[in-house]
Amino acid sequence: MKKILNTTVLVGSILLMVTLFSCKKFLDIKPQSELTTGNAYNSAQDLENAVNGAYRALYYEYYQWVNVLLGDMRADNSYIGGSGDPPLAEMDNVNISVANTPNYNNWSQLYIGIGRCNVILEKANSVNDPALDVNNLREQIIGQASFLRAFHYFQLVKLWGGVPIELNSNSADPSKTNLSRSTETQVYDQIVKDLEVAVADLPDSYGNGQAIDREKATKGAANALLAKVWAQRSDRDYTKVIHYCNEIIGSPSGYSLMSNYADLFDGSHYGNSESILEIAYVGGNWDVSNWGVELFLGLDDGWQKYCVPSKDLVAAYESQGDSIRKNANITFVSNTGWADENWNPCNDNSVAVPFNYKQKHPDGWNSGDRPYLLRLGDIILLKAEALNETGDLGAALAALNMIRQRVNLPDATASSKEDLRAKILLERRLELAFEAHRWDDLVRLGVCTEVMNNLQEFKYTCEGGTMSAPVRINYNVNHDKWLCPIPQLERDANPNLTQNPGYQ
């Protein structure tokens, strides 16, 4: 597992973080629960250990925080903050270069996760151990590996479009490893194929309590991802989206909305009825903690944080009178000790600056806060979108208003499909901010270019204690920028990789 190490400590209460991407170091920690391709797979325990190792891919940097940068900071929910690191500034400005380091790391980490799943799926049926035939253990192992592989490919195809479909990770033969890119449709078809295996093989519950069912892939998680897949792919099928959303809503697992939205993110209600899948970080242990929270919040360590909520997002909450979700997702702090080019350019101690507050317990890089990978609120709003797109505006409004009623907002009305589409998109923004969904929503509904280029966000400078006139941020987004560039290091290693349009 790769983890960012802070590199400079100032004695006392101030922690300075030097250039995050140029000076960081990584630890590659191999857990005892992980087997590699070189290990023997002789028993059920070996395969279970390998599955535990496969879940460790969710502890990589991509799932710790970079997915939020790409989902919220790249969109209109937040901006870079931090120390303006050039690789992150490229994401914030929607101008990612082919040499961007995090872009390369994302590709590498997701394929590492896929490779772990491939090994399990290659070995699972060849292990002769009677224990695998008890309580469908073999099928559960295959189902979990199939789900995790599909989940990683879902990230890949959203980021880069068509990518190589690597299903064979034991080969060193370049003819098998230097694969060409498949089409977007082919990648999504492989994801669907894996998820159909997962739905067939996974249980609704592992029988060890609801919390365990939210930490491991289940039939519910597979159905939820199928709903998202059929919505996100270019050849989307909203009828299938409705079907898979209904599978979740009517699941024997008993998924239901939490009555109090804020409880979802207070750190005391993980494994709840609304959670479908969450990353099972453990606080106080560097190996398995959620260190990403420190990069978003960490109020007492003296350096500027990343993914700062935008004025546009704050205004969206305030325009709806949505104080419940605003207060659960954003916290304002004065006397931060640094200037902020959007909110407080002159470092006025009386001016409050917002922080991403979705996860609330940084705990000095050792947080136990668990981000949701899949939750029911997202699925209900996705069903509302699908119902609207298939012409059932009444049912779509009912689903939308179920989410609004929880946070004491009046029921929405709509005059047309187009009107309701915009209202559902707004509701998803308010409900799911900092959960890495916003960019995908803008792309899926075909409004990414319009929204980003019409965004009224400004930067300021400070001269002699006086704030400058506002300077509008121009994103210059076009359709090519909806996808990231294929990392140049990958193209150097694999001459069969073509580049996405608009990148050199």
Image: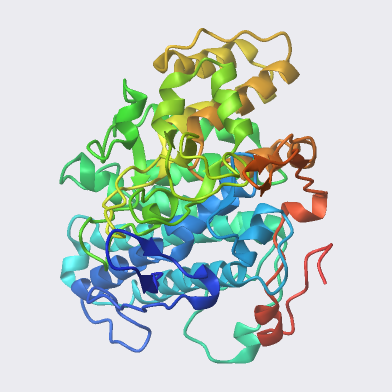
What residue do we see at 49% from left, 42% from top? 434
Note whether 371 is above or below 63 in the view shown. Answer: above
Give 437 or 296, whichever is nearer the viewer: 296
Place of residue 42 in the rendered image (x, y in percent of width and height, measured from the top left): 23, 82
Residue lying at the far bottom in this picture: please name it: 173
- Is any part of residue 390 visible from this angle? no
Give 53 or 311, whichever is nearer the viewer: 311
Can you say which quadrant of the picture contains the N terminus?
bottom left
> Residue 494 vs residue 501: left or right?
left
- Is any part of residue 33 visible from this angle? yes
Place of residue 62 in the rendered image (x, y in percent of width and height, measured from the top left): 48, 61
Note whether 438 is above or below 386 in the view shown. Answer: below
Asked which colour scheme the image uses, the reply is rainbow
> Residue 366 vs residue 101: left or right?
left
What residue do we see at 49% from left, 50% from top? 338
Can you say which quadrant of the picture contains the C terminus?
bottom right
Note whether 474 is above or below 149 in the view shown. Answer: above
Give 467 or 362, whichever is nearer the viewer: 467
Place of residue 503 in the rendered image (x, y in percent of width and height, measured from the top left): 81, 67
What residue do we see at 70% from left, 38% from top? 457
Which image quarter: residue 311?
top right
Give 340 or 31, whichever is nearer the viewer: 340
> Residue 350 vs residue 191: left or right?
left
Place of residue 439 in the rendered image (x, y in percent of width and height, measured from the top left): 63, 44
Residue lying at the far front in this picture: please name it: 464
